Amino acid sequence: MNKISIHCQSIPGWIPQYLDRGGVSWLKIVDPPEQDPFPGVRIIARGFMPDAEANDLIWQGRDGAQAWYNRWRPWMMARPYVHAFEGPNEPHPMANNYFRAALNEFTVELARLMHADELKLVGMNWSVGWPFEEHAKNLGDGVEACDYLGLHEYSAPAMWDNESWLCLRYRRTIAELKAAGYQVPPVLVTECGIDGGVLGAEEAKKGWAEYTDIAGYVDQLAWYNDRLNEDDYVKAAFVFTTCDWDWYTFNVTEPLAMEMAKRLASSEPPPPPPPEEPGGEMIEGIDVSEWQGAIDWQAVAASGVKFALIRASVGRSDGTIAKDKYFEQNWEGAGQADVLRGPYHCVSDKSLGQARFFKDTVAERVPEIGLWGDFEEAGMSPTRPDLFLEAADRNFGQTADVYSRASFVNPWWPYEWGEGRRWWVASWDVAAPVLPTGVTRWTFWQYTSKGSVPGIVGNVDLDRYNGSLDDLHAEFGLEPPEPPPPPEEQTFRQAVLSRLDAIIELLKRIEAKA
Protein backbone atom coordinates (compact mmCIF):
# COMPACT_ATOMS: atom_id res chain seq x y z
CA MET A 1 0.00 0.00 0.00
CA ASN A 2 1.23 3.48 -0.83
CA LYS A 3 1.05 5.61 2.32
CA ILE A 4 3.22 8.39 0.85
CA SER A 5 1.36 11.51 -0.21
CA ILE A 6 2.40 15.15 -0.60
CA HIS A 7 2.46 18.26 1.57
CA CYS A 8 1.16 21.14 -0.59
CA GLN A 9 1.78 24.84 -0.08
CA SER A 10 0.75 25.38 -3.68
CA ILE A 11 -1.42 23.05 -5.76
CA PRO A 12 0.20 22.24 -9.11
CA GLY A 13 -1.94 20.88 -11.91
CA TRP A 14 -0.38 17.40 -11.81
CA ILE A 15 -1.61 16.58 -8.27
CA PRO A 16 -4.71 14.66 -9.51
CA GLN A 17 -2.45 12.59 -11.74
CA TYR A 18 -0.21 11.71 -8.79
CA LEU A 19 -3.16 10.75 -6.61
CA ASP A 20 -4.57 8.56 -9.36
CA ARG A 21 -1.32 6.92 -10.46
CA GLY A 22 -0.02 6.50 -6.93
CA GLY A 23 -3.23 5.06 -5.54
CA VAL A 24 -3.24 7.71 -2.82
CA SER A 25 -6.36 8.79 -0.93
CA TRP A 26 -4.77 11.45 1.33
CA LEU A 27 -3.38 14.94 0.71
CA LYS A 28 -2.19 17.73 3.01
CA ILE A 29 -2.83 21.33 1.99
CA VAL A 30 -1.69 24.49 3.77
CA ASP A 31 -4.38 27.18 3.50
CA PRO A 32 -6.74 25.15 1.26
CA PRO A 33 -9.56 26.84 -0.68
CA GLU A 34 -13.17 26.84 0.48
CA GLN A 35 -14.28 24.64 -2.41
CA ASP A 36 -13.19 21.01 -2.34
CA PRO A 37 -10.34 20.74 -4.89
CA PHE A 38 -10.21 16.92 -4.85
CA PRO A 39 -13.55 15.26 -4.04
CA GLY A 40 -13.16 11.85 -2.49
CA VAL A 41 -9.65 12.55 -1.15
CA ARG A 42 -9.03 12.86 2.59
CA ILE A 43 -7.69 16.39 2.95
CA ILE A 44 -5.58 17.29 5.97
CA ALA A 45 -5.63 21.08 6.32
CA ARG A 46 -3.37 23.51 8.13
CA GLY A 47 -4.03 27.22 8.40
CA PHE A 48 -0.76 29.14 8.54
CA MET A 49 -0.01 30.95 11.79
CA PRO A 50 3.48 32.19 12.73
CA ASP A 51 5.12 29.80 15.20
CA ALA A 52 5.76 32.51 17.79
CA GLU A 53 2.09 33.51 17.83
CA ALA A 54 0.94 29.89 18.15
CA ASN A 55 3.43 29.15 20.93
CA ASP A 56 2.28 32.20 22.88
CA LEU A 57 -1.24 30.74 22.86
CA ILE A 58 0.00 27.28 23.87
CA TRP A 59 1.67 28.80 26.94
CA GLN A 60 -1.81 29.93 28.02
CA GLY A 61 -3.09 26.36 28.17
CA ARG A 62 -6.89 26.08 28.16
CA ASP A 63 -7.43 29.80 27.62
CA GLY A 64 -5.00 29.76 24.72
CA ALA A 65 -6.88 26.88 23.09
CA GLN A 66 -10.10 28.86 23.27
CA ALA A 67 -8.40 31.89 21.71
CA TRP A 68 -6.85 29.72 18.98
CA TYR A 69 -10.18 28.12 18.21
CA ASN A 70 -12.05 31.42 18.13
CA ARG A 71 -9.49 32.62 15.59
CA TRP A 72 -9.71 29.56 13.34
CA ARG A 73 -13.27 28.29 13.80
CA PRO A 74 -14.91 30.37 11.01
CA TRP A 75 -12.13 29.36 8.63
CA MET A 76 -12.58 25.67 9.42
CA MET A 77 -16.36 25.81 9.23
CA ALA A 78 -16.08 27.27 5.72
CA ARG A 79 -14.27 24.08 4.60
CA PRO A 80 -16.65 21.21 5.48
CA TYR A 81 -14.94 18.85 3.03
CA VAL A 82 -11.73 18.75 5.10
CA HIS A 83 -11.16 15.40 6.78
CA ALA A 84 -9.12 16.78 9.70
CA PHE A 85 -7.49 20.06 10.70
CA GLU A 86 -4.04 20.45 12.22
CA GLY A 87 -3.52 22.33 15.45
CA PRO A 88 -0.42 24.47 16.06
CA ASN A 89 2.64 23.46 14.05
CA GLU A 90 5.91 22.33 15.68
CA PRO A 91 5.24 23.57 19.23
CA HIS A 92 8.30 24.70 21.19
CA PRO A 93 10.15 24.80 23.60
CA MET A 94 9.40 21.09 24.01
CA ALA A 95 12.30 20.61 26.48
CA ASN A 96 10.55 22.88 28.98
CA ASN A 97 8.45 20.98 31.55
CA TYR A 98 6.02 23.86 31.97
CA PHE A 99 5.54 24.22 28.22
CA ARG A 100 4.75 20.50 27.87
CA ALA A 101 2.16 20.79 30.63
CA ALA A 102 0.63 23.81 28.89
CA LEU A 103 0.63 21.98 25.53
CA ASN A 104 -1.11 19.02 27.13
CA GLU A 105 -3.83 21.25 28.60
CA PHE A 106 -4.11 23.26 25.36
CA THR A 107 -4.59 20.12 23.25
CA VAL A 108 -7.23 18.55 25.50
CA GLU A 109 -9.29 21.75 25.39
CA LEU A 110 -8.80 22.27 21.65
CA ALA A 111 -9.99 18.71 20.97
CA ARG A 112 -13.06 19.30 23.13
CA LEU A 113 -13.95 22.49 21.27
CA MET A 114 -13.44 20.94 17.85
CA HIS A 115 -15.38 17.80 18.69
CA ALA A 116 -18.33 19.92 19.81
CA ASP A 117 -18.48 21.19 16.20
CA GLU A 118 -17.83 17.70 14.78
CA LEU A 119 -14.36 18.63 13.54
CA LYS A 120 -11.35 16.32 13.70
CA LEU A 121 -8.04 17.36 15.21
CA VAL A 122 -4.55 16.37 14.11
CA GLY A 123 -2.78 17.27 17.31
CA MET A 124 0.79 17.81 18.58
CA ASN A 125 2.53 18.01 15.16
CA TRP A 126 5.93 17.69 16.81
CA SER A 127 9.04 18.67 14.88
CA VAL A 128 11.63 16.02 14.04
CA GLY A 129 13.35 14.44 17.03
CA TRP A 130 10.72 15.47 19.56
CA PRO A 131 9.62 14.68 22.19
CA PHE A 132 12.71 13.53 24.08
CA GLU A 133 12.58 10.11 25.70
CA GLU A 134 10.55 10.09 28.92
CA HIS A 135 8.80 13.29 27.83
CA ALA A 136 6.03 11.77 25.69
CA LYS A 137 4.19 10.41 28.72
CA ASN A 138 3.79 14.00 30.00
CA LEU A 139 1.60 14.61 26.93
CA GLY A 140 -0.55 11.48 27.08
CA ASP A 141 -3.85 13.18 27.92
CA GLY A 142 -3.47 15.51 24.95
CA VAL A 143 -2.51 12.66 22.63
CA GLU A 144 -5.54 10.62 23.70
CA ALA A 145 -7.85 13.56 23.03
CA CYS A 146 -6.75 13.88 19.38
CA ASP A 147 -8.30 12.15 16.39
CA TYR A 148 -4.82 11.79 14.87
CA LEU A 149 -1.35 12.18 16.34
CA GLY A 150 0.67 14.38 14.00
CA LEU A 151 4.46 14.45 13.87
CA HIS A 152 7.32 15.28 11.51
CA GLU A 153 10.13 12.95 10.44
CA TYR A 154 13.22 13.98 8.48
CA SER A 155 16.81 12.84 8.20
CA ALA A 156 19.93 13.60 6.13
CA PRO A 157 21.96 12.96 4.10
CA ALA A 158 19.56 9.99 3.65
CA MET A 159 16.24 9.22 5.28
CA TRP A 160 17.51 5.98 6.81
CA ASP A 161 20.42 7.68 8.61
CA ASN A 162 19.93 7.52 12.39
CA GLU A 163 16.91 5.29 11.85
CA SER A 164 14.48 5.24 14.80
CA TRP A 165 15.96 8.44 16.24
CA LEU A 166 14.87 10.66 13.34
CA CYS A 167 12.77 8.79 10.76
CA LEU A 168 10.71 6.07 12.49
CA ARG A 169 11.15 7.81 15.83
CA TYR A 170 7.36 7.61 16.15
CA ARG A 171 7.78 3.96 17.16
CA ARG A 172 9.74 4.92 20.29
CA THR A 173 7.25 7.64 21.17
CA ILE A 174 4.21 5.41 20.77
CA ALA A 175 5.83 2.60 22.76
CA GLU A 176 6.46 5.07 25.60
CA LEU A 177 2.89 6.35 25.53
CA LYS A 178 1.43 2.85 25.53
CA ALA A 179 3.73 1.74 28.34
CA ALA A 180 2.35 4.64 30.38
CA GLY A 181 -1.19 3.37 29.77
CA TYR A 182 -2.34 5.83 27.11
CA GLN A 183 -4.44 5.01 24.06
CA VAL A 184 -2.75 6.37 20.94
CA PRO A 185 -4.92 7.52 18.01
CA PRO A 186 -3.95 6.81 14.38
CA VAL A 187 -0.72 8.51 13.29
CA LEU A 188 -0.16 10.96 10.44
CA VAL A 189 3.40 11.94 9.54
CA THR A 190 2.37 15.42 8.50
CA GLU A 191 5.84 16.30 7.13
CA CYS A 192 8.66 14.00 6.05
CA GLY A 193 11.64 13.75 3.72
CA ILE A 194 15.26 14.92 3.67
CA ASP A 195 16.16 18.05 5.65
CA GLY A 196 19.77 19.04 6.26
CA GLY A 197 18.68 20.94 9.34
CA VAL A 198 19.03 17.72 11.37
CA LEU A 199 22.82 17.94 10.73
CA GLY A 200 23.21 21.43 12.17
CA ALA A 201 22.44 25.07 11.49
CA GLU A 202 24.87 25.28 8.57
CA GLU A 203 22.82 22.67 6.69
CA ALA A 204 19.42 24.18 7.51
CA LYS A 205 16.93 24.58 4.70
CA LYS A 206 18.78 22.14 2.45
CA GLY A 207 16.37 19.64 0.95
CA TRP A 208 16.63 16.43 -1.03
CA ALA A 209 18.07 18.09 -4.15
CA GLU A 210 21.22 19.00 -2.15
CA TYR A 211 21.96 15.36 -1.29
CA THR A 212 20.63 13.05 -4.00
CA ASP A 213 18.81 12.83 -7.32
CA ILE A 214 15.25 11.79 -8.15
CA ALA A 215 16.06 8.08 -8.34
CA GLY A 216 17.93 8.18 -5.03
CA TYR A 217 15.15 10.07 -3.27
CA VAL A 218 12.50 7.70 -4.58
CA ASP A 219 14.57 4.76 -3.26
CA GLN A 220 14.53 6.35 0.18
CA LEU A 221 10.81 7.10 0.06
CA ALA A 222 10.15 3.50 -0.99
CA TRP A 223 12.17 2.30 2.01
CA TYR A 224 10.17 4.59 4.28
CA ASN A 225 6.87 3.45 2.78
CA ASP A 226 7.80 -0.19 3.42
CA ARG A 227 8.51 0.63 7.07
CA LEU A 228 5.23 2.54 7.45
CA ASN A 229 3.36 -0.45 6.10
CA GLU A 230 4.67 -2.49 9.01
CA ASP A 231 2.54 -0.31 11.31
CA ASP A 232 -1.19 -0.35 10.63
CA TYR A 233 -1.74 2.62 12.93
CA VAL A 234 0.18 4.92 10.55
CA LYS A 235 -2.34 6.09 7.99
CA ALA A 236 -0.31 8.42 5.74
CA ALA A 237 2.89 10.46 5.44
CA PHE A 238 3.25 13.72 3.51
CA VAL A 239 6.49 14.55 1.69
CA PHE A 240 7.49 18.19 2.16
CA THR A 241 6.58 20.11 -0.12
CA THR A 242 5.13 21.67 -3.26
CA CYS A 243 5.83 25.39 -3.14
CA ASP A 244 6.29 27.79 -6.04
CA TRP A 245 7.88 30.64 -4.04
CA ASP A 246 10.27 29.02 -1.53
CA TRP A 247 11.83 25.75 -0.31
CA TYR A 248 13.32 25.18 -3.74
CA THR A 249 15.58 22.23 -2.88
CA PHE A 250 12.72 20.51 -1.05
CA ASN A 251 10.26 20.99 -3.87
CA VAL A 252 8.30 17.95 -5.04
CA THR A 253 8.44 18.53 -8.77
CA GLU A 254 6.30 16.82 -11.37
CA PRO A 255 9.14 14.47 -12.51
CA LEU A 256 9.77 13.47 -8.89
CA ALA A 257 6.06 12.97 -8.20
CA MET A 258 5.53 10.78 -11.26
CA GLU A 259 8.50 8.59 -10.31
CA MET A 260 7.12 8.34 -6.78
CA ALA A 261 3.75 7.26 -8.15
CA LYS A 262 5.33 4.71 -10.46
CA ARG A 263 7.46 3.17 -7.70
CA LEU A 264 5.07 3.39 -4.78
CA ALA A 265 1.75 2.70 -6.48
CA SER A 266 -0.31 0.12 -4.69
CA SER A 267 -1.15 -3.07 -6.48
CA GLU A 268 -4.81 -3.51 -7.28
CA PRO A 269 -6.63 -4.06 -3.99
CA PRO A 270 -8.16 -7.49 -3.55
CA PRO A 271 -11.82 -7.67 -4.53
CA PRO A 272 -14.18 -7.13 -1.62
CA PRO A 273 -15.55 -10.29 -0.06
CA PRO A 274 -18.91 -11.44 -1.42
CA PRO A 275 -21.93 -10.45 0.63
CA GLU A 276 -23.82 -12.98 2.66
CA GLU A 277 -26.82 -14.54 1.03
CA PRO A 278 -30.02 -13.80 2.93
CA GLY A 279 -30.46 -16.42 5.60
CA GLY A 280 -33.57 -18.28 6.57
CA GLU A 281 -35.77 -16.52 9.09
CA MET A 282 -36.27 -12.75 8.92
CA ILE A 283 -38.53 -10.74 11.19
CA GLU A 284 -40.59 -7.73 10.22
CA GLY A 285 -40.23 -4.12 11.32
CA ILE A 286 -40.86 -0.55 10.21
CA ASP A 287 -39.16 2.84 10.27
CA VAL A 288 -41.19 5.95 11.01
CA SER A 289 -41.03 9.73 11.31
CA GLU A 290 -43.43 12.63 11.67
CA TRP A 291 -44.59 11.94 8.11
CA GLN A 292 -46.65 9.00 9.40
CA GLY A 293 -48.54 11.23 11.84
CA ALA A 294 -50.14 9.69 14.93
CA ILE A 295 -49.64 5.91 15.10
CA ASP A 296 -51.71 3.25 16.89
CA TRP A 297 -48.76 1.25 18.19
CA GLN A 298 -50.89 -1.49 19.73
CA ALA A 299 -52.39 -2.20 16.30
CA VAL A 300 -48.91 -2.10 14.76
CA ALA A 301 -47.61 -4.66 17.26
CA ALA A 302 -50.67 -6.88 16.83
CA SER A 303 -49.91 -7.06 13.08
CA GLY A 304 -46.60 -8.80 13.79
CA VAL A 305 -44.17 -5.84 13.72
CA LYS A 306 -41.34 -6.59 16.16
CA PHE A 307 -39.10 -3.52 15.84
CA ALA A 308 -39.18 0.11 14.78
CA LEU A 309 -36.42 2.51 13.76
CA ILE A 310 -37.70 5.91 14.84
CA ARG A 311 -36.48 9.26 13.54
CA ALA A 312 -35.30 11.45 16.41
CA SER A 313 -33.91 14.45 14.56
CA VAL A 314 -32.96 15.81 11.16
CA GLY A 315 -30.32 18.15 9.75
CA ARG A 316 -31.60 20.44 7.02
CA SER A 317 -29.96 21.89 3.93
CA ASP A 318 -30.35 25.42 5.32
CA GLY A 319 -28.03 24.51 8.21
CA THR A 320 -30.73 24.15 10.86
CA ILE A 321 -31.41 21.02 12.94
CA ALA A 322 -34.85 19.96 14.16
CA LYS A 323 -36.35 17.36 16.44
CA ASP A 324 -38.88 15.06 14.80
CA LYS A 325 -42.30 16.29 15.97
CA TYR A 326 -43.51 12.78 16.77
CA PHE A 327 -40.29 11.33 18.22
CA GLU A 328 -41.34 11.30 21.87
CA GLN A 329 -44.85 10.05 21.06
CA ASN A 330 -43.51 7.30 18.78
CA TRP A 331 -40.84 6.26 21.26
CA GLU A 332 -43.29 5.93 24.15
CA GLY A 333 -45.99 4.28 22.06
CA ALA A 334 -43.67 1.68 20.57
CA GLY A 335 -42.25 0.88 23.99
CA GLN A 336 -45.70 0.41 25.52
CA ALA A 337 -46.52 -2.02 22.69
CA ASP A 338 -43.30 -4.01 23.30
CA VAL A 339 -41.89 -3.04 19.89
CA LEU A 340 -38.08 -2.83 20.02
CA ARG A 341 -36.77 0.69 19.27
CA GLY A 342 -33.74 2.33 17.69
CA PRO A 343 -33.41 6.11 17.05
CA TYR A 344 -31.96 7.60 13.87
CA HIS A 345 -30.83 11.04 12.70
CA CYS A 346 -31.02 12.26 9.09
CA VAL A 347 -27.61 13.82 8.42
CA SER A 348 -27.11 17.01 6.42
CA ASP A 349 -23.86 18.30 4.99
CA LYS A 350 -24.67 21.86 6.07
CA SER A 351 -25.69 21.57 9.72
CA LEU A 352 -23.21 21.87 12.60
CA GLY A 353 -23.40 19.97 15.89
CA GLN A 354 -25.75 17.28 14.60
CA ALA A 355 -24.39 14.43 16.72
CA ARG A 356 -24.72 16.51 19.88
CA PHE A 357 -28.29 17.52 18.92
CA PHE A 358 -29.14 13.86 18.23
CA LYS A 359 -27.86 12.87 21.66
CA ASP A 360 -29.71 15.72 23.37
CA THR A 361 -32.92 14.62 21.64
CA VAL A 362 -32.57 10.97 22.60
CA ALA A 363 -31.47 12.11 26.08
CA GLU A 364 -31.58 9.27 28.62
CA ARG A 365 -33.65 6.92 26.46
CA VAL A 366 -31.87 3.62 25.87
CA PRO A 367 -31.58 2.56 22.20
CA GLU A 368 -32.56 -1.11 22.17
CA ILE A 369 -31.52 -1.89 18.60
CA GLY A 370 -28.70 0.57 18.01
CA LEU A 371 -28.56 4.22 17.02
CA TRP A 372 -28.26 5.20 13.39
CA GLY A 373 -27.00 7.91 11.07
CA ASP A 374 -29.06 8.27 7.88
CA PHE A 375 -26.90 9.26 4.88
CA GLU A 376 -28.86 10.06 1.74
CA GLU A 377 -28.68 13.84 1.18
CA ALA A 378 -27.79 14.70 -2.42
CA GLY A 379 -24.36 16.28 -2.81
CA MET A 380 -23.09 15.15 0.58
CA SER A 381 -19.34 15.44 1.12
CA PRO A 382 -17.55 12.06 1.40
CA THR A 383 -16.11 13.19 4.75
CA ARG A 384 -19.49 13.87 6.39
CA PRO A 385 -20.33 10.27 7.44
CA ASP A 386 -16.94 9.91 9.11
CA LEU A 387 -17.30 13.19 11.00
CA PHE A 388 -20.86 12.51 12.13
CA LEU A 389 -20.34 8.88 13.14
CA GLU A 390 -17.24 9.54 15.22
CA ALA A 391 -18.96 12.48 16.91
CA ALA A 392 -22.00 10.30 17.61
CA ASP A 393 -19.75 7.59 19.04
CA ARG A 394 -18.29 10.14 21.46
CA ASN A 395 -21.62 11.69 22.42
CA PHE A 396 -23.44 8.42 23.05
CA GLY A 397 -20.52 6.39 24.34
CA GLN A 398 -21.36 3.56 21.94
CA THR A 399 -20.88 2.79 18.26
CA ALA A 400 -23.29 4.49 15.88
CA ASP A 401 -24.42 2.54 12.83
CA VAL A 402 -25.16 3.36 9.18
CA TYR A 403 -28.28 3.71 7.05
CA SER A 404 -27.74 4.24 3.31
CA ARG A 405 -27.97 2.56 -0.07
CA ALA A 406 -25.32 1.07 -2.32
CA SER A 407 -25.66 3.60 -5.14
CA PHE A 408 -25.14 6.48 -2.69
CA VAL A 409 -21.97 5.31 -0.91
CA ASN A 410 -20.23 3.19 -3.56
CA PRO A 411 -18.54 6.21 -5.23
CA TRP A 412 -16.77 6.79 -1.90
CA TRP A 413 -15.29 3.28 -1.67
CA PRO A 414 -13.18 2.49 0.31
CA TYR A 415 -15.03 4.06 3.24
CA GLU A 416 -13.17 3.20 6.43
CA TRP A 417 -15.89 4.85 8.49
CA GLY A 418 -18.20 1.93 7.67
CA GLU A 419 -15.90 -0.71 9.12
CA GLY A 420 -17.01 -2.22 12.41
CA ARG A 421 -20.50 -0.74 12.10
CA ARG A 422 -23.84 -2.35 11.39
CA TRP A 423 -25.58 -1.52 8.11
CA TRP A 424 -29.24 -0.78 7.59
CA VAL A 425 -29.52 -0.96 3.81
CA ALA A 426 -32.18 0.61 1.61
CA SER A 427 -32.80 -1.68 -1.36
CA TRP A 428 -36.36 -1.57 -2.64
CA ASP A 429 -38.43 -4.00 -4.65
CA VAL A 430 -35.76 -6.70 -4.99
CA ALA A 431 -35.59 -10.30 -3.80
CA ALA A 432 -32.44 -9.67 -1.74
CA PRO A 433 -30.75 -6.43 -0.66
CA VAL A 434 -28.07 -4.91 -2.89
CA LEU A 435 -25.19 -4.23 -0.49
CA PRO A 436 -22.62 -1.42 -0.71
CA THR A 437 -19.16 -2.43 -1.90
CA GLY A 438 -17.24 -4.20 0.84
CA VAL A 439 -20.25 -4.70 3.12
CA THR A 440 -20.66 -8.41 3.77
CA ARG A 441 -23.60 -8.44 6.16
CA TRP A 442 -26.72 -6.35 6.52
CA THR A 443 -28.50 -6.00 9.85
CA PHE A 444 -31.70 -4.30 8.69
CA TRP A 445 -33.09 -4.17 5.16
CA GLN A 446 -35.54 -1.45 4.16
CA TYR A 447 -37.24 -3.29 1.34
CA THR A 448 -40.04 -0.90 0.36
CA SER A 449 -41.18 2.66 0.97
CA LYS A 450 -44.80 1.88 0.09
CA GLY A 451 -45.80 -0.56 2.77
CA SER A 452 -49.06 -0.73 4.65
CA VAL A 453 -49.42 -1.64 8.32
CA PRO A 454 -52.51 -1.61 10.56
CA GLY A 455 -52.37 1.37 12.89
CA ILE A 456 -50.69 3.69 10.35
CA VAL A 457 -52.55 5.84 7.84
CA GLY A 458 -50.83 5.89 4.44
CA ASN A 459 -47.52 4.41 3.31
CA VAL A 460 -44.73 3.40 5.65
CA ASP A 461 -41.22 2.00 5.11
CA LEU A 462 -41.04 -1.74 5.78
CA ASP A 463 -37.88 -3.38 7.11
CA ARG A 464 -36.57 -6.83 7.91
CA TYR A 465 -33.98 -8.01 10.41
CA ASN A 466 -31.41 -10.52 9.19
CA GLY A 467 -32.31 -13.32 11.59
CA SER A 468 -34.85 -14.52 14.11
CA LEU A 469 -36.31 -12.62 17.05
CA ASP A 470 -33.93 -14.54 19.32
CA ASP A 471 -31.03 -13.48 17.07
CA LEU A 472 -32.12 -9.83 17.26
CA HIS A 473 -32.21 -9.92 21.04
CA ALA A 474 -28.82 -11.63 21.18
CA GLU A 475 -27.14 -9.24 18.71
CA PHE A 476 -28.12 -6.18 20.73
CA GLY A 477 -27.55 -7.72 24.15
CA LEU A 478 -31.22 -7.80 25.12
CA GLU A 479 -32.97 -10.28 27.38
CA PRO A 480 -34.36 -13.25 25.40
CA PRO A 481 -37.95 -12.69 24.28
CA GLU A 482 -40.70 -14.10 26.46
CA PRO A 483 -41.75 -17.52 25.14
CA PRO A 484 -45.41 -17.78 24.15
CA PRO A 485 -47.57 -19.23 26.92
CA PRO A 486 -48.25 -22.97 26.56
CA PRO A 487 -51.75 -23.94 25.46
CA GLU A 488 -54.10 -24.50 28.36
CA GLU A 489 -54.66 -28.15 29.20
CA GLN A 490 -58.34 -29.12 29.18
CA THR A 491 -59.78 -31.03 32.09
CA PHE A 492 -61.69 -34.26 31.37
CA ARG A 493 -64.98 -32.48 32.13
CA GLN A 494 -64.09 -29.61 29.73
CA ALA A 495 -63.21 -32.09 26.99
CA VAL A 496 -66.53 -33.96 27.41
CA LEU A 497 -68.56 -30.74 27.39
CA SER A 498 -66.71 -29.50 24.32
CA ARG A 499 -67.47 -32.77 22.52
CA LEU A 500 -71.14 -32.59 23.54
CA ASP A 501 -71.36 -29.03 22.24
CA ALA A 502 -70.00 -30.22 18.89
CA ILE A 503 -72.53 -33.09 18.75
CA ILE A 504 -75.41 -30.76 19.58
CA GLU A 505 -74.30 -28.33 16.86
CA LEU A 506 -74.14 -31.19 14.35
CA LEU A 507 -77.65 -32.41 15.28
CA LYS A 508 -79.02 -28.89 14.83
CA ARG A 509 -77.58 -28.74 11.30
CA ILE A 510 -79.10 -32.15 10.42
CA GLU A 511 -82.50 -31.07 11.77
CA ALA A 512 -82.33 -27.83 9.82
CA LYS A 513 -81.69 -29.69 6.58
CA ALA A 514 -84.55 -32.10 7.30
Image: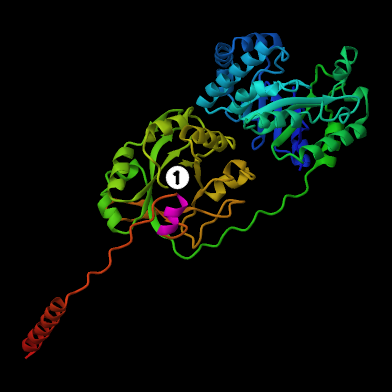
Q: Horizontal placement of 41 versus 399: left or right?
A: right
Relative to residue 185, is residue 284 depicted above or below? below
* Residue that numbered label 1 is attached to: 370
Q: Quadrant of the N terminus?
A: top right
> Which of the 4 image quadrants contains residue 507?
bottom left
**Residue 39, image x and y in percent?**
64, 35
Question: Can the viewer see residue 301?
Answer: yes
Question: Can the viewer see residue 117?
Answer: no
- How many badges with numbers are in the image? 1
Nearer-the-camera pick, 436 or 328: 328
Overall secondary structure of the magenta stretch? helix
Residue 293 belongs to the span the image colors magenta? no
Q: Quadrant of the C terminus?
A: bottom left
- Extreme bottom residue here? 514
**Residue 121, image x and y in percent?**
61, 26
Pointer 1: residues within 10 angstroms few (<14), some, or many (20+)?
some
Relative to residue 267, is residue 228 depicted above or below? above
Residue at 69% of width from left, 23% of height from top?
136
**Residue 318, image x and y in percent?**
45, 29
Relative to residue 433, is residue 80 depicted above or below? above
Residue at 68% of width from left, 13% of height from top?
97
Nearer-the-camera pick, 146 or 256: 146
Q: Horizontal placement of 310 versus 22: left or right?
A: left
Magenta region: which residues? 469-476
Q: Amino acid at mark 1?
A: Gly
> Which of the 4 image quadrants contains residue 329?
top left
**Residue 108, image x and y in percent?**
57, 21
Q: Horizontal placement of 86 versus 467: left or right?
A: right
Relative to residue 264, is residue 52 depicted above or below? above
| Secondary structure found at label 1 | loop
Colour mode of the rendering: rainbow
